[in-house]
Image (tube, helix red, strand yellow):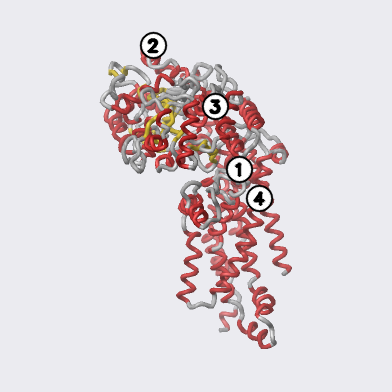
């Protein structure tokens, strides 16, 4: 019996040790773990001896950036890459609801993918700032910089950390806007307030349109959605543009969304019968309600939605019932809005394997700066961030697409890319919590000050 | 017969013990690996500033700082209050409703009984995501069947934002939790009522006991172990209510549906910029375990006394 007990004790101890070993980190990775207070040490990366065996397979996790969420589309691109380089690409598709959780969990478990497709608010301001990403500075020469800056000088600024490290190699961009149900506007006589040539309108026109629609339908016309952070670029742009409010300071060091103009905008929105502060909707659900014809405006919109509303594949620029959808800039006092931008590109997680990092860089070069870039851009349904890629002209890739061409009218309104401000993730939480409280009737000035202060405190 | 009464030989006893332990081993590995070790890691981490940015599993030792901070955190306190509201409303109603339904159906014909069992058990075996999607449609602010029905009946004039209003969101969550929780207790109570010793029931009836007295003095004591199990399981499930909140309200509006369980997830995986977010979330986990432990102990104690 004693022997059995001993054997059992041994096996239990073995289980515990094995489980602990599984929970722990490999010692080699421990030794390479970066100082969390700093970005990744470039000297450390350079001094790493390149692996003798080149990486035969790399992993890519992609957020739903246009059709980069579609397996068939992405497979065509990765197959082309594999055919040219011999490197296989294993792709995993993330969504915006649980994607961050998956990445954060993977980072915690030292199991992050080699590549990720997303925007600077995550790649630069979050994972880059926390030392998880590889600096891609060596991938840019003067030609690359000039090709990108020729489109918009803010692109590289957004992809670059304050210390000069570049954590995102940009691929595509767009301006986020709002949308209106044209048939509903016409029925309510509110189409007179829309300038469909320039796709702009003033705040006064917007207010009149909401009133006209509410009088006609006697129900909620549009929703300031605040279930969570999903699609919050829409509510931010709406509030900021109505009376010229700001979101951060120009240096991106402080959140300023408690300014008087934003308070004025929120007070105005809260007072309107046709506008609901709806804590049961986020951006995706708002789009669905707009697509179904329940809401007459959507504040969460961009070209991808215009081409395929609600991702339902029922026809471009149409609601479920066939009503026409017009994209619009956000209303501002003079009709000139500052639109929130989306800049999507690739980042490389620093997994400590030089061969894999090199293979990931090859992938980025293939997708973002080669004769294949046009395909990669078209897959996203957005606009190229550069004029040419290795001699291939990217400026006319949408020349045969009337909707894309029309949408370029909004691109000059692309505003400051403030999403790289420190503490961005915590700030987003404060924003939608603030909207929820405003929706419940709390004192707007008090609430906005409290949450903006909390966002700044979290940003340190 | 004489042989079977003989004590087992030492060798045979040892062989049976070994076989027993070997059968247990696979479960033991999983139990130790996925319950015991994570439990200890959780307790240890709750005393540290562990977060996803620092290398290694544990950050710096901070003692009881996380636990002190908890009681200064308004969101945690609100979450704790909501959790207790869910438990206090959900547990008695689930038990009472299950007992009532079981009493009504346990004597039915087998076919009818099986049909009722299936109906009440269906929400339990249906995936929580599917259940949530259906309820979301029903609660929808603009097109939900609930608003449509109430408006048609003239009970309300304006649509109610069931999940988007502070006054109704938590109640909506409790209603869904109720429908997904009653299935198992009903099946257990039906079984327990079927196992009540009929000779005792008949004896009581012969002695002139009323139906209520028969139930309270004869059946109820025999069902006590089942009741105790149901109470403990329902309490734990109510404390751990997470999926419904994550899928429907994300703790809102204005923290009206935040629970400790959801706030643990939120702190650990959403507030990743916050210093020591893993440690803080684990401290909440430890507190939740303590509360569940205390409540379960009270229930066991009361059950034993009864």
Question: Please, which chain is the residue tagged with disc 4 on?
Answer: B
Question: Please, which chain is the residue tagged with disc 1 on?
Answer: B
Q: Residues within 10 Å of mark 3 (few under 14, many from 20)?
A: many
Q: Position of residue A430 (x, y in %)?
A: 59, 33
Q: Nearer the viewer, mark 4 or mark 1?
A: 1
Q: To which residue does mark 1 refer?
A: B264
Question: Contact, CB < 8 Å: mark 3 with mark 2?
Answer: no
Residue A322 lies left or right of residue B192; in this view the side is left
The CA distance from mark 2 to mark 1 is 47 Å
Residue B81 lies left or right of residue A295; in this view the side is right
Q: Position of residue B218 (x, y in %)?
A: 67, 78
Residue drawn at x 40%, y 31% is A191
**On-image quarter of the N terminus of chain A:** bottom right
The CA distance from mark 1 to mark 3 is 22 Å
In the picture as drawn, the residue positioned furthest to the bottom comes out as B206
Q: Residues within 10 Å of mark 4 (few under 14, many from 20)?
A: some
SS category of the residue bearing label 3: loop
Q: To which residue does mark 2 refer?
A: A142
Question: Contact, CB < 8 Å: mark 4 with mark 3?
Answer: no
């Amino acid at each position: 019996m004693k022997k059995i007990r001993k054997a059992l004790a041994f096996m239990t101890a073995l289980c515990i040790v094995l489980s602990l070993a599984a929970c722990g980190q490999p010692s080699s990775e421990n030794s390479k773990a970066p100082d969390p207070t700093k970005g990744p040490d470039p000297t450390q990366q350079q001094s790493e001896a390149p692996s003798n065996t080149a990486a035969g397979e790399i992993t890519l996790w992609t957020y739903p950036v246009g059709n980069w969420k579609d397996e068939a589309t992405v497979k065509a691109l990765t197959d082309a890459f594999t055919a040219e380089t011999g490197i296989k690409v294993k792709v995993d598709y993330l969504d915006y609801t649980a994607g961050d959780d998956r990445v954060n969990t993977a980072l915690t478990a030292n199991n992050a993918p080699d590549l990720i497709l997303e925007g600077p608010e995550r790649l630069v301001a979050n994972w880059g700032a926390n030392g998880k990403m590889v600096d891609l500075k060596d991938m840019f020469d003067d030609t690359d910089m000039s090709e990108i800056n020729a489109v918009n000088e803010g692109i590289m600024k957004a992809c670059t950390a304050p210390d000069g490290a570049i954590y995102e190699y940009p691929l595509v961009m767009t301006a986020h806007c709002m949308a209106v149900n044209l048939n509903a506007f016409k029925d309510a006589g509110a189409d007179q307030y829309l300038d469909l040539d320039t796709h702009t309108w003033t705040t006064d026109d917007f207010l009149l349109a909401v009133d006209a629609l509410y009088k006609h339908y006697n129900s909620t016309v549009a929703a300031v959605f605040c279930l969570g952070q999903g699609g919050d670029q829409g509510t931010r742009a709406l509030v900021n543009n109505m009376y010229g409010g700001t979101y951060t300071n120009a240096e991106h060091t402080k959140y300023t969304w408690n300014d008087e103009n934003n308070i004025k905008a929120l007070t105005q929105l809260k007072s309107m019968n046709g506008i609901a502060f709806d804590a049961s909707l986020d951006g995706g659900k708002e789009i669905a309600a707009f697509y179904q014809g329940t809401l007459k405006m959507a504040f969460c919109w961009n070209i991808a939605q215009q081409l395929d509303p609600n991702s339902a594949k029922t026809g471009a620029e149409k609601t479920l019932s066939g009503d026409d959808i017009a994209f619009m800039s956000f209303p501002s006092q003079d009709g000139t809005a500052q639109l929130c931008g989306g800049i999507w590109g690739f980042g490389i997680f620093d997994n400590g394997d030089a061969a894999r990092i090199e293979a990931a860089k090859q992938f980025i070069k293939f997708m973002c700066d080669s004769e294949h870039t046009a395909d990669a851009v078209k897959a996203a349904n957005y606009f190229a961030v550069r004029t040419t890629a290795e001699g291939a002209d990217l400026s006319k890739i949408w020349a045969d697409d009337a909707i894309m061409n029309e949408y370029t009218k909004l691109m000059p309104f692309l505003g400051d890319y403030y999403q790289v401000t420190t503490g961005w993730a915590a700030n987003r939480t404060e924003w939608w919590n603030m909207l929820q409280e405003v929706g419940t009737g709390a004192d707007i000035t008090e609430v906005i000050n409290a949450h903006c202060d909390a966002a700044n405190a979290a940003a340190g | 017969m004489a042989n079977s009464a003989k004590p087992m030989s030492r060798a045979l006893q040892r062989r049976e013990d070994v076989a027993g332990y070997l059968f247990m081993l696979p479960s033991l590995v999983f139990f130790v690996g996925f319950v015991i070790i994570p439990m200890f890691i959780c307790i240890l981490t709750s005393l540290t500033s562990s977060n996803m940015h620092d290398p290694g599993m544990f950050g710096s030792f901070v003692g009881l700082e996380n636990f002190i901070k908890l009681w200064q955190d308004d969101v945690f306190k609100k979450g704790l209050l909501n959790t207790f509201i869910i438990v206090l409303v959900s547990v008695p109603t689930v038990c009472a409703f299950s007992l009532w339904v079981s009493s009504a159906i346990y004597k039915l014909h087998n076919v009818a009984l099986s049909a009722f069992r299936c109906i009440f058990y269906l929400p339990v075996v249906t995936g929580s995501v599917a259940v949530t999607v259906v309820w979301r449609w029903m609660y929808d602010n603009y097109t939900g069947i609930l608003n449509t029905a109430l408006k048609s009946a003239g009970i309300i004039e304006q649509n109610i934002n069931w999940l988007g209003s502070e006054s109704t969101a938590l109640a909506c969550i409790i209603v869904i939790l109720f429908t997904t929780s009653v299935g198992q207790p009903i099946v257990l109570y039906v079984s327990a009522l079927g196992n009540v010793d009929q000779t005792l029931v008949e004896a009581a009836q012969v002695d002139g006991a009323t139906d209520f007295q028969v139930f309270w003095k004869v059946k109820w004591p025999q069902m006590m172990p089942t009741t105790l199990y149901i109470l403990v399981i329902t309490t734990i499930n109510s404390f751990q209510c997470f999926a419904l909140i994550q899928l429907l309200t994300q703790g809102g509006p204005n923290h009206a549906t935040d629970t400790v369980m959801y706030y643990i997830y939120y702190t650990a995986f959403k507030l990743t910029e916050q210093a020591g977010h893993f440690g803080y979330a684990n401290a909440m986990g430890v507190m939740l375990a303590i509360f569940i432990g205390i409540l379960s102990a009270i229930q066991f104690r009361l059950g034993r006394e009864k």
